[in-house]
Amino acid sequence: MLAGVHLELARKITRAPRPGERTYVSVFGLTATMAVALAAPVLSAALLLAWAGPPGPIVLPAVVVPLVLPMFAARRFNRTESSRWPAAEPALYVLLTFAGYFLLGLQPR
């Protein structure tokens, strides 16, 4: 669910909403929307680590690699004059997260 929260919020982050556009930024502000959009993947990773047990050769990459995408998107958004959050990273984050869930499901317990 937290991966979906990131996708939902990140795809609607903009510095300048178009007239009539409904965004979370209009309701919560840019800083708060970005904070929640970035907290969701971190919380998701923490819960996954807690559930998966001690980090092993499969667990750690399956949890850490997807986190790179939201952080990279935030850095890119903050360093450029772009008015919108990068579009590809949220979707790729969700795909990598689900791939990680799959890998963790294959891990022997």
Image (cartoon, rainbow, N blue to C red):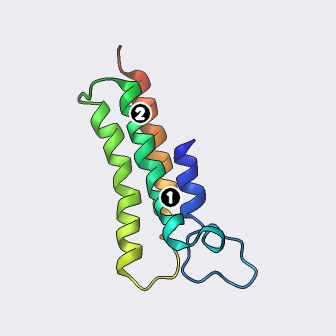
Q: Which residue is mark 2?
A: 48
Give how far across and how far down residue 28 sits, in percent.
60, 68
Amino acid marked by disc 1 = Ala
Quadrant location of the C terminus? top left
| Residue under the image location 56 percent in, 70 percent down | 13
User: What SS does tag 2 mark?
Assistant: helix
For marks 1 and 2 on the same chain, the one whose residue lies earlier in the sequence: 1
Q: Badge 1, how many Cα within 10 Å: few under 14, some, many 20+?
A: many
User: What SS does tag 1 mark?
Assistant: helix
Q: Name the outermost residue toward the left.
A: 57
Amino acid marked by disc 2 = Leu
| Residue under the image location 50 percent in, 58 percent down | 37
- Image height of 47 relative to 84, above or below: above
- Image height of 57 relative to 5, above or below: above
Give how far across and how far down residue 20 sits, in percent.
76, 80
- Horizontal side of 7 relative to 42 (left or right) equals right
Q: Which label was assigned to residue 37?
A: 1
State yes or no: discs 1 and 2 in contact (Cβ < 8 Å).
no
| Residue under the image location 33 percent in, 55 percent down | 68
